[in-house]
Amino acid sequence: MVREFADLETLSAAAAEKFCRITQDAIAARGRCTVVLAGGSTPRRPYELLATPMYRTKVQWDRLEFFWGDERMVPHDHPDSNFRMANETLLSRIPVSEHNIHRIQTERGAPQTVAQDYEEEIAQVFHLPLGGQPPAFDVILLGMGADGHTASLFPYSDALDETSRWVVPNHGPMPDIERVTMTPRVINTARHVIFLVAGADKAQTLAQVLEGTRDPQRFPAQLICPVLGELAWFVDFAAAAELRRAKESGGLHA
Ligand code: 6PG
C-alpha cells in the first residue's frame, strides 16, 4: 500500500496516527508492542509529533519495547547516532522505562560483537532461541535513501545476502562509517513495516523500487516484503512525483 501526502508534515501526522493504532491493537492482543525505530532524518517529525499531547495520550508508553533497525558505529551521544536522534525527539519526552529501550550498544566493541550482542538481547526479550526463527516485531519503521538502501542494507553489500543472522555488521556511505543492521529476514517477519520517504531526491529511486525491474542488489528496499505482515509506504508528493508520472504516461524512465 502506498499512501501519498502533500508534505512531510501531513505524512508525519498520518504516520503518528498509524503508529498509535498499531500500538493499541498490539497491546490489546498481546499486552505489549514491540517497535523498531528508523534512523535518518525523515522520522524526526513523526517522532516529535508522537511526543506532543495530541498523540502522547493515545499510547500506553509503558507497554512499548523499543529497538533500532540499524545503528551507526558511533557513541550513543554522537550527532550521527540513530539512538540519539530518537532519544532527543521522542524517548526523552515520553514516560518509558529505560528497561524497555533496547538500543544497539556500539560501545561493546567491534561491529561483529555489537551485532551478536544485539541478537542476544532480541532473543532474550522475545524468549526465543538465538539463531532460530526471528521474532515478529509489531512494527518496524524504515527510511529509504536516494540510492535505494534501507536500514543499513546498502546496494551490493554483504548484508543483502544474509539469510540466517538477525543482525549483522555492514559498511555504509553518508556518513562513511561502519554500521550494524537488522537483516531482511527479521524485517520481513514483522507484523507491520512502514517506510517513511520524503523529498524529490528520492523520486526516481522510489519509482524504480516500486514499479521497476526487480534488482534488489541495486535497490535493497526491494528486499522488504513481509511474509505475513502489512507493508505500507508513506511518501510525500515530491518523492512520489516519478511514480505518478510513470502511472500517467504508462512507463518509467530507464
Ligand atoms: C540510517 C538509516 C537509513 C535512513 C535512510 C533515509 O541510519 O541512515 O536508518 O536507512 O533511514 O538513509 O534517511 P533520510 O530519512 O535521512 O532520508
Image: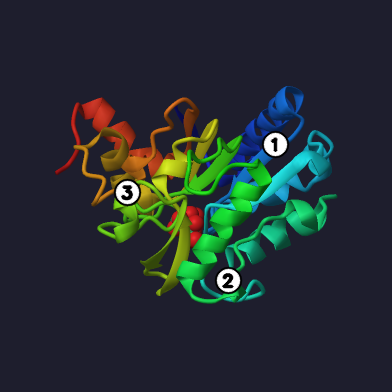
Local SS, label 1? strand
* Image-based side of 51 in relation to 192, left or right: right
Q: Earlier in the sequence, mark 2 or mark 1?
A: 1
Q: Which mark is residue 105?
A: none
Query: Is the C terminus in the top left, top right, bottom left or bottom right quadrant?
Result: top left
Residue indicated by mark 2:
106
Residue 178, given in percent of the width and then of the height, sits at: 43, 72
Residue at figure coordinates x 36%, y 45% from the top left: 221
Q: CA distance from mark 2 to mark 1?
A: 24 Å
Local SS, label 2? helix
Dot 3 crowding, Cα within 10 Å, few <14, some 14–19, many 20+: many
Residue type marked 3: Pro
Front residue of 57/96: it is 96
Residue 147, given in percent of the width and then of the height, sits at: 31, 56
* Image-based side of 2 in relation to 213, left or right: right
Residue indicated by mark 1:
33
* Image-based side of 212 in relation to 56, left or right: left
Residue 202 makes an appearance in the image: yes
